[in-house]
Image (cartoon, rainbow, N blue to C red):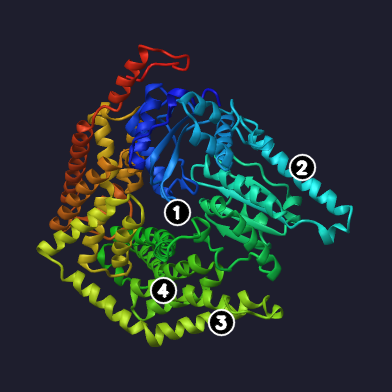
Amino acid sequence: MSDMITADLVDLDLSADTKEAAARALAERMVALGRVTDLEGFLADVAAREAQMPTGLDGGIGIPHCRSEHVTEPTLAFGRSAAGIDFGAADGPADLIFLIAAPAGADDAHLTILSSLARQLMNTEFTDALRSARDAESAAALIRGDEEPAEAAPEATAGAGEDSVAASAAASADAATASTAAASTEEPAQDTRPFRIVAVTSCPTGIAHTYMAAESLENAGREAGVELVVETQGSAGFTRLDPAVIADADGVIFAHDVPVREKDRFAGKPTVDVGVKAGINRPTELITEVRGKAERGEVSAAGRPGSTPVERAGESGDSYGTKLRKWLMTGVSYMVPFVAAGGLLIALGFAIGGWKIADAPSVMKHFSWTEIDSWGALLFQIGGVAFGFLIPVLAGYIAYGMADRPGLVPGFVGGMISSQIAAGFLGGLVAGLLAGGVVLSIQRIKIPPVLRGIMPVVVIPLISSLIVGFLMFVVVGKPIAEAQKGMTDWLNGLSGSNAILLGVLLGLMMCFDLGGPVNKVAYAFATAGIAVQDPSDSAMKVMAAVMAAGMVPPLGMALATTVRKKLFTETERENGKAAWVLGASFISEGAIPFAAADPLRVIPASMAGGAVTGALSMAFGATLRAPHGGIFVVPLIGSPFLYLIAIAAGVCVTTGLVVVLKSMRKPATGTAATAATAAADAPTADQKQPVAA
């Protein structure tokens, strides 16, 4: 680790009072040594990682980190704060701050070294030594492993350097072997062998929390007298646990913030599924919990609470509001392909056969291979069938997100009832939530072992469908249908300034998070309006405004990288070339690379352009029957010329605003250049390259 941290990268009197200021102060040291080429870009990457999950840990530690294209080589900076800085840890501010910078393409060896630091942070002797270090050189030496903590036990520092991960694993294996051997000399192994646990740890970046959770769990396992083996699924890849080790395990712990890879390997065992920070902060509780589940005979299986597809992708400690958003987004994400396929087929049917194609007889009764109208009717009717699945799919997969496969049947049943009673999109949302809630409630009932085999196949679908059907037909269906009708009537009555204000709102929503939940809410609102065979004129205006606004951010960024290249990095200019195509295709996510690197400038500029486009599209009365397609469905748009003008106006606003905002930004290398100039008067052996100009 000698080339990763030097005394120049240590600040024992860090005066920052916020985590942003602390990251900036430490990052400026990296820039001064040429380790980071773009200060603002790097800090944007750090902030993006911090937004995924706070990096504060119990024990007064803050460990902001990221992988960034602005990093030239793996680098670690350390700061010590007397007042403490809030990094989101439950026990209060952090006084030890480690900023880890890894290149976007960091090799496995460097990432292994970074994981070594993460494991050392679980050693109290190590952190105590850092708190008492008197000078920067001593602190850097401690972190590199050149010096040992004064009171550290030999095994605490045996893993310093690139081999620490292997040393820790070997020590764990030796302890497990010794424990097993000792047990075998007393009684038969099946009676005295230690409780065996396999664990998987992972975090979004795969650099720090992954390995810290592993170290914490291994330490707690040794203290509890259990055999605990961890598979770290980090940035450097992962080495799969031996299938025999998994087969012999009595329980499983998942401490993760990204989906566990190849999770089916662990099916059928008592499982505790938590976020990665729980693995760091309360490993003993997790071990106790999995042992309790094993004693009660609780095993992981499809359909059990806590094993749903949505909860596997996030932290199990999410608030109910966060989980609700994820459940709704699951339903919307599965519904969108039906919307796209059905809507485009219907639009093509109209394009070929005209608006009267909706009154054509069934192609089962009349279809002529040589008549163009027959082909138009075929496309229209296939699209209509696809649209018929929208509400059932929405409801079914909301329930699936809540309760896994057992939620599908009552969800689809409730969604189909919603379609039949004209409860529409709102009815589908309610039906999905009801279905998921009913299934989860049924699963909490203690069932005799003899009945468990038929529960997911017969009992749960039967009872849940009956309950959901009753509620939708008799209790909540009619009020929801009335609300849906009221919303439709309100939409149809929009005109003048009200319609323009709606266009502004939809434009802002489409550009706020670029394909995220807010964007999807606006898109779902628009597609629900046209998800009928005869949508109103107002609904088609809403769809046109939504698609136009969604095209603005990537097109605006693409134009900005063309007219003012110097304001963007080489990578951003390359992304700008792709953004032309993505924007033209109505893929708002094409602007995400720009927003991630500079959110405070790109997102407001995008929202301003989207609002202008949404307002103009509504003012011009442009209509759209297709739910997707971008410029490729312009022939299907009402008032296509004015529609393109609305898009062009929004793109120009976004481009102009982002150029102005970026031009006002102070040069990223200004502070660093000053530091580098000062350092040049007293060069050190570690200053390998000049600051990037």
Q: Quadrant of residue 108?
A: top right
At a point 70% along the width and 68% down the height, the residue shown is: 295
Question: Around disc 2, counting alpha carbons within 10 Å, would you say few (fewer than 14), some (14 to 19), or many (20 or more)?
Answer: few
Cα separation, mark 1 vs mark 4, equals 68 Å
Question: Which mark's residue is nearer the viewer, 1 or 4?
Answer: 1
Question: Around disc 4, counting alpha carbons within 10 Å, would you say few (fewer than 14), some (14 to 19), or many (20 or more)?
Answer: few
Residue 279, given in percent of the width and then of the height, sits at: 57, 52
Callout 3, which amino acid?
A: Leu
Callout 2, which amino acid?
A: Asp
272 is higher (above) or lower (below) than 430:
above
Which mark is on residue 298?
Answer: none
Residue, disc 3? 462
Residue, disc 2? 174
Residue, disc 1? 90
The tag earlier along the polypeptide, 2 or 4, is 2
Question: Which mark's residue is nearer the viewer, 3 or 1?
Answer: 1
Which mark is on residue 365?
Answer: 4
Left or right: 244 in relation to 137: right
At a point 52% along the width and 72% down the height, the residue shown is: 407
Callout 4, which amino acid?
A: Lys
Q: Are marks 2 and 3 in contact (CB under 8 Å)?
A: no
At a point 80% along the width and 56% down the height, the residue shown is: 193
Question: Around disc 3, counting alpha carbons within 10 Å, would you say few (fewer than 14), some (14 to 19), or many (20 or more)?
Answer: some
Q: Quadrant of residue 340?
A: bottom left
Q: Secondary structure at mark 3?
A: helix
